[in-house]
Image (cartoon, rainbow, N blue to C red):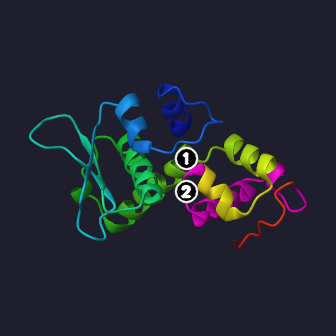
Amino acid sequence: MAAALLRQRGGLPASTPILDAADLARTATLLRVYRRPLPLGIRGLLAGVGGRRAALVVNARLSVVDRNVSAAHELGHWVLHAGAMPDAIGRGERRRREWEADRFALELLLPEALVRRVLVERRCSMGAAAERLGVRGTYLSRRIRELRRADQPFFRRGSPVRGFSDTT
């Protein structure tokens, strides 16, 4: 729901791929956005410096696709966990917040209507569909599994999503 609202705020319908989530952050939020080389292992982060407006920083060393997913993930933290003190939470809570930010990124980058349209229109491989959507194949596969678990009829076995197994 929050991802759909952010798309709407940025003027992006559910049928449009987001190929630059950092650009959406610039246009639809109060975040400042930077691409900077960060240490390996840090894909992105939210920062607040000196009482100034929060900033989303994405590792410039990542591929375009990985920067897109990382920006969407950090947007999830900003939307879902605004004002939370990350240092003051336990490991279980931290894992839950990371899961929520990942789920937000999935919903933001791969809304059901968009995934459905691309798979039906293209009848293509997972890799080709993922490339068109600006994500990795593993990310698209995860979203399809999630939609199957949510019992979306379109994504059931025998549906137009042929060739995409639960383990793809």
Q: CA distance from mark 2 to mark 1?
A: 8 Å
Q: Residues within 10 Å of mark 1 (few under 14, many from 20)?
A: many
Residue at 75 percent across and 43 percent down: it is 117
Return the residue nearer the eye: 1 or 162.
162
- Residue 71 in the image, given as x and y percentages of width and height: 39, 49
Residue at 47 percent across and 59 percent down: it is 99
Quarter of the image containing the C terminus? Answer: bottom right
On the image, numbered disc 1 is attached to which residue? 109
- Residue 3 in the image, given as x and y percentages of width and height: 52, 39
Q: Which mark is residue 135?
A: 2
Q: Earlier in the sequence, mark 2 or mark 1?
A: 1
Helix, strand or loop at mark 2: loop
Helix, strand or loop at mark 1: helix
| Image quadrant where residue 114 sits | top right
Q: Is residue 140 magenta?
A: yes
Q: Nearer the viewer, mark 2 or mark 1?
A: 2
In the image, is 124 to the left or to the right of 53? right
> What is the span of residues highlighted in magenta in the rendered image?
133-159
- Residue 32 in the image, given as x and y percentages of width and height: 26, 37
Q: Main secondary structure of the magenta part?
A: helix
In the image, is 89 to the left or to the right of 21? left
| Image quadrant where residue 149 sits | bottom right
Q: Is residue 39 magenta?
A: no
Residue 143 visible? The answer is no
Residue at 41 percent across and 61 percent down: it is 63
- The reply to whether callout 2 and callout 1 are in contact (CB within 8 Å) is yes
Amino acid type, mark 1: Leu
Residue 133 vertical placement versus 31 (above, below): below
In the image, is 139 to the left or to the right of 34? right
